[in-house]
Amino acid sequence: MCFSATANFVGSAVLGGIGVATLTEVKHRRELLFAAMPCLFAFHQFIEGFVWLGLGGILSPAVTRNAGAAYVLYAQGLLPFLLPLSVLLLEPTRKLRRQMLPFAILGGALMLYMLWGLIAYPLQISVEDNSIVYINAITTTTLIAILYVIATCGSLFFSGFRDLITLAWLNLIGLLVVILVKRYAFTSIWCAYAAVVSVIIYYFFRRSRAHRPSTYALVA
């Protein structure tokens, strides 16, 4: 998140509360991963708070590197797979799940490729215009950014739930705006934006409770 460690820690606390409230709305275990997204973003923002402290000289360089690596590991290595997978698991109809499957496969391939890149190449962390910049030779290329957008937004467009299609448009617009306006700080700003948009996930679970099935096995 931009500006300071305080912004990250406060945002993390707020998102944590929203995340716990979201988890209380779960009706089936297939919904758990998607419902856990706000909590995961809360923990993610909490980690970046330590990156800010390290860059400010409060923590050691080793702690700063480890916190930055953990932050990027989730944002670039895990999220492009976890998000489409969580949407696929949430979808009750087999037909739409089949349409979402290519995005989960793409996300899985991206996850493996970017995890390799994060292991094989050094991660550079710096501050520019009140934003943290994470640079890796493999994970911050234009091609990877395009595939990242497709993997993280694509499956949402095929959802049978209208609120999730709205979320897809908001995610897509947010991603494109960040890429065009502040590409160099994509990882930090996009994850902060996605964390805020996670509020929609809570309202989705609240509003769709009566329409979500108690079992997924028999839905065609």
Image (cartoon, grey):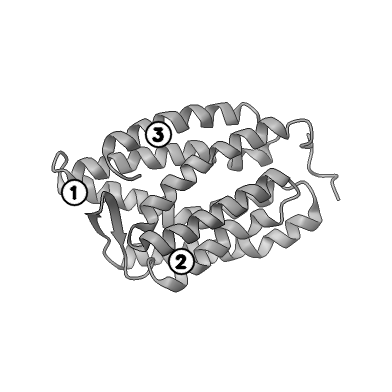
Q: Amino acid at mark 2?
A: Ala
| Residue name at image x 74 percent, y 55 percent | 97
Residue 44 occupies quadrant: top left
Q: Examine the rendering and report whether any part of residue 65 can be seen.
A: yes
Work out how far the residue at label 2 is from the one at label 1, CA to CA, in angstroms: 28 Å
Q: Nearer the viewer, mark 3 or mark 1?
A: 3
For label 2, the residue is 145
Query: Would you say residue 27 is visible in this rendering?
Result: no
Which numbered disc flags the more N-terminal residue, 2 or 1? 1
**CA–CA distance in space, label 3 to label 2:** 25 Å
- C-alpha span from label 3 to label 1: 23 Å
Q: Position of residue 42 (x, y in %)?
A: 43, 37
- Label 1 neighbourhood size at 10 Å, few (<14), some (14-19), many (20+)? few
The residue where tag 1 is placed is: 62
- Kind of residue at badge 3: Ser
**Mark carried by residue 12:** 3
The answer to which quarter of the image holds residue 6 is top left
Direction from residue 33 to residue 179 in the image, left or right: left
> What residue appears at the point 34 percent right and 37 percent down from the top-left corner?
8
Compared with residue 34, is residue 178 higher up or lower down, i.e. above or below?
A: below
> At x 79% / y 38%, what residue is drawn?
215
- Which label is found at residue 180? none
| Residue 81 x/y as whole percent | 54, 56
Foreground of the two, 79 or 166: 166
Looking at marks 3 and 1 on the same chain, the residue that comes earlier in the sequence is marked by 3
Q: Nearer the viewer, mark 2 or mark 1?
A: 2
The disc, 3 or 2, on the residue closer to the chain's N-terminal end is 3
Q: What percent of the width, then of the height, locates residue 33?
A: 59, 42
Instruction: Rate crowding at label 3 as few (under 14), some (14 to 19) or many (20 or more) other CA atoms within 10 Å.
Output: many
When the figure is inspected, residue 184 is found, relative to residue 202, above or below; the finding is: below
| Residue 77 image offset from top left, x and y in percent | 44, 57
